[in-house]
Amino acid sequence: MGIIEDLSKTIETRLEAAPAESYVASLNEKGTNYIIEKISEETTEAILAAKDFDKSPESVKNLTHEIADLWFHSMVLLAHFDIKPDEVLKVLQDRFGHSGLAEKAKRANKENR
């Protein structure tokens, strides 16, 4: 988990930089919709990498790089809204040990009320 904390702190620091000097600051300055567009782009690239996945070293490298880009841009979005990754990790921790199917059914029941 150390890398998530380290990356989060780096992103927070770079939000304070001038947009011309920091990719993170430039994303933040362009706003929510632009960050969402980047996440959409990275999601598509991850999907395509997974679709073409064949277990070769190049395929593994491609998929892991695309997922890393997706995670990074997701973390930028969280920072844009001043949400710490710990809040997402807590949700995952709370779900740990619970059936994914049961969790999904529980959410569906709430939506049908």
Image (cartoon, rainbow, N blue to C red):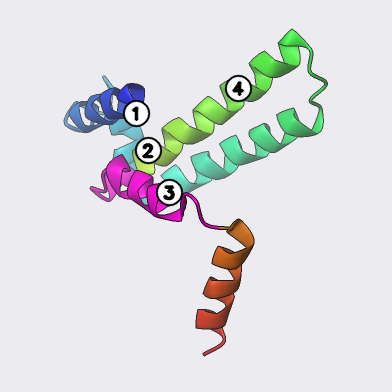
The mark nearer the N terminus, 3 or 2, is: 2
**Residue 43 % position (x, y):** 61, 40
Report the front residue among 99 and 2. 99
Tell me the residue at 66%/33% (across/down).
45
The mark nearer the N terminus, 1 or 4, is: 1
Q: Which residue is mark 1?
A: 4
Tags 1 and 2 touching, CB below 8 Å: yes
Report the front residue among 18 and 78. 78
Q: Which mark is residue 92?
A: 3
User: Per the image, is 84 magenta?
Assistant: yes
Note whether residue 103 is visible: yes
CA–CA distance between discs 1 and 2?
A: 9 Å
Tell me the residue at 29%/43% (across/down).
86
In the rendered view of the protein, which quadrant contains the N terminus? top left
CA–CA distance between discs 1 and 4?
A: 16 Å
User: Per the image, is 29 magenta?
Assistant: no
Residue at the farthest top position: 57
Q: Which residue is mark 4?
A: 64
Helix, strand or loop for disc 1: helix
Report the front residue among 62 and 105. 105
Q: Which residue is mark 2?
A: 75
